[in-house]
Image (cartoon, grey):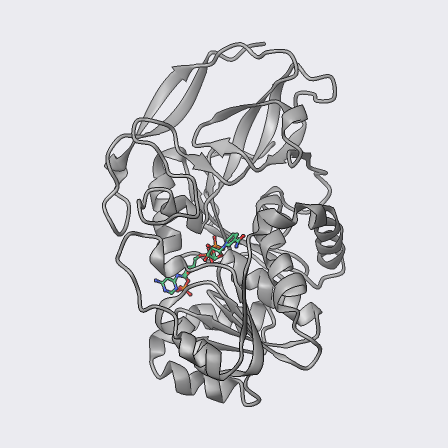
Amino acid sequence: MQLVENLIARYVRQAEPGLLTADTFALERKPLPPLREGEILIRTIYLSIDAGSRAQFDDRADYVIKAVLGKVPGSSGAVGEVVESRHRDWRSGDLLVTPHARWQLYQVAAPAAEPLLRRIDPGMGPLAMHLGALGMVGFTAYIGIFHVGRPQPGETLLVSAAAGATGALAGQFGRIAGARVVGIAGGAEKCAFVRERLGFDACIDYKAGNLDQAIRAACPQGVDVYYENVGGAIQHAAFAAMNDFGRIALCGQVGQYSGAGAQAGPNLMTAVLKRLQIQGFLAMDHLDRHATFHDSAAAWYRAGQLQHHATLTQGLENIHEAINSLMAGRNIGKQLCQVSAEPGQEFPLTAPSFTAFGPGASHR
Ligand SMILES: NC(=O)c1ccc[n+]([C@@H]2O[C@H](COP(=O)([O-])OP(=O)(O)OC[C@H]3O[C@@H](n4cnc5c(N)ncnc54)[C@H](OP(=O)(O)O)[C@@H]3O)[C@@H](O)[C@H]2O)c1
């Protein structure tokens, strides 16, 4: 059966700095071309929303491919269900995760050309987890902790944006590595979540002020490894708390991605005086480690050592709000835009927007 229409979200109005407005995008129905040999048609269930989702509309952010006015923006991943197949290994009803997706209800993919497109075992936890703890953010955090920062048992690891997708996983991996883990997050509610649900040893609310003092109090032995996600004043305070010869895993600078203007540059003299080792990294450079990551993270999840948390925004028409949720810090864990129902699910959902998965996790 060939479906006739797709639903797409087109980028139609130049994004202004700051939060995105609904009129930046327009929903359209568009005919789908017939599948070619070797292709599959995927119904999108979840689209990954991440820091790069906003950066693609900021001309000055140079680490993502820019969205083009008049075209359909891209996403760093999707979970979906195969609804038609012209590939001998794929059947209607198969569930998969792919790192290449557009803002549309249906995606066409050629599995042979996409090595990271993977079939999902429906028995392996919730579907959304394949864009979170078992997805690219999980992989990013795994590389940043085990191959860049390398916290040792008893060392202190400090993680910024600790209640967000990457930070929450970086901290959990730090605990698995045996470190004492301290988070930085915005607001008392997020800090309670980081401590009580994720099991960090402490969490600092950077919005409460006195950040330097708060880090010193939470890290009495100083900071050995800093997992950097945000930049600006938080980065300054974290560098100042580092022990001599400390290591910094430079994962991102989310505070700079919304076109809101440059933040204070890095305090590099502190890095000189403390002889810090600073390493930027991109998870995509380490794909040879992806299979090991996936096996390890799945085993930790099964053993109850790793939790996945997600915040859902429903409907392709609300995708700008999903991005705003991330930039305004409303998300806890992995931010997703749910485009259509999981198998057997009513859509739109009446359930709350925040979901938590994993042994010990509960819904709220
Ligand atoms: N190197 C790589 O390969 C790679 C791959 C993926 C992601 N990343 C990086 O990982 C970081 C996190 O990305 P994510 O997609 O997982 O997003 P996320 O952490 O789930 O969400 C972003 C969080 O950042 C915080 N935030 C937003 N604006 C901020 C600001 N101006 N100052 C301080 N905090 C701010 C908010 O939390 P609060 O409420 O706590 O402020 C928000 O929840 C980003 O820097 C991204 O570039 C890097």
- Position of 162 with respect to 146 (left or right) is left
Residue at position x 47%, y 38% in the image: 75
Across and down, in percent, residue 17 comes to 24, 50
Front-most of residues 255 and 167? 255
- Position of 300 with respect to 334 (left or right) is right
Find residue 181 and report its image quarter.
bottom right
Give the answer, above or below, for where 89 lies relative to 326: above
Is residue 360 something one can see in this rendering?
no
Residue at position x 47%, y 77% in the image: 271
Is residue 262 something one can see in this rendering?
yes
Across and down, in percent, residue 216 comes to 47, 87
Residue at position x 37%, y 19% in the image: 29
- Taking the image in four quarters, ligand 1 sits in the one at bottom left
Q: Where does the N terminus fall, quadrant-wise? A: top right
Across and down, in percent, residue 136 comes to 58, 48
Give the answer, above or below, for where 171 lies relative to 346: below
Across and down, in percent, residue 96 comes to 64, 33
Front-most of residues 344 and 255? 255
Front-most of residues 266 and 349? 266
- Position of 83 with respect to 291 (left or right) is left
Q: How many marks?
A: 0
